[in-house]
């Protein structure tokens, strides 16, 4: 499977992080001296977790389905007599 899902989520997280940095800063001139340092000091783990959650939820469904297409070609050829419905790594390697 490719890394498209992870890359998409990371891109969305970075976009949120930069938006927060650029648009949620204070407009006060005294605060503008080193806003980036203050931003990083004020950013909490809780903020990051919420941004990660929002980024994950915004990943489109087609991005999640696309990587499975590569694996589905192999799963179609596996013997369907397996009662549990699961496929072992050995079975995949044999294909």
Image: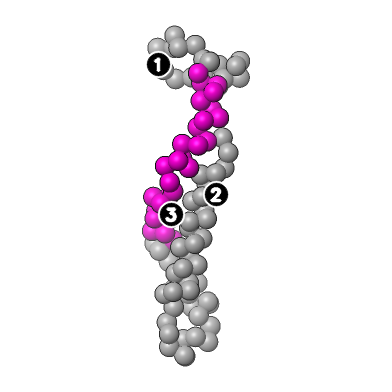
Pinpoint residue 20: horizontal percent, then vertical percent. Answer: 44, 69
Question: Which badge, 1 or 3, comes first in the chain's sequence?
Answer: 3
Question: Which badge, 2 or 3, comes first in the chain's sequence?
Answer: 2
Pinpoint residue 2: horizontal percent, then vertical percent. Answer: 58, 38
- SS for callout 2: helix
Question: Of all residues shown, which one is farthest toward the top?
Answer: 81
From what the image shows, is residue 64 above or below residue 24? above
The reply, left or right, for residue 89 in relation to residue 25 is: right
Q: Mark 3 points at which residue?
A: 55
Query: Residue at coordinates 40% horizontally, 63% vertically from top-left?
Result: 47
Is 63 included in the stretch rendered in magenta? Answer: yes
Q: Mark 2 points at which residue?
A: 7
Query: Residue at coordinates 41% horizontally, 51% vertically from top-left?
Result: 58
Residues in magenta, as a range: 48-76
Report the quarter where the C terminus lies: top right
From what the image shows, is residue 53 above or below residue 34? above
Q: Name the residue under label 1.
A: 84
Res 48 label = none
Q: Is the magenta stretch mostly helix, strand or loop?
A: helix
Q: Give 73 or 88, whichever is nearer the viewer.
A: 73
Q: Dot 3: few (<14), some (14–19), or many (≥20) neighbours within 10 Å? A: some
Distance, label 1 to label 3, CA atoms, is 34 Å
Distance, label 2 to label 1, CA atoms, is 33 Å
- SS for callout 3: helix
- SS for callout 1: loop
Report the quarter where the N terminus lies: top right
- Does the rendering let one see residue 73? yes
């Amino acid at each position: 499977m490719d890394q498209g899902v992870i890359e998409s989520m990371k891109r969305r997280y970075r976009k949120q992080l930069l938006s927060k940095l650029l648009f949620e800063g204070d407009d006060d001139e005294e605060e503008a001296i080193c806003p980036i340092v203050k931003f990083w000091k004020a950013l909490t783990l809780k903020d990051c977790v919420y941004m990660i959650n929002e980024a994950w939820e915004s990943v489109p469904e087609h991005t999640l389905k696309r990587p499975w297409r590569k694996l589905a070609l192999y799963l179609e050829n596996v013997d369907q007599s397996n009662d549990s419905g699961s496929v072992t790594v050995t079975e995949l390697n044999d294909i």
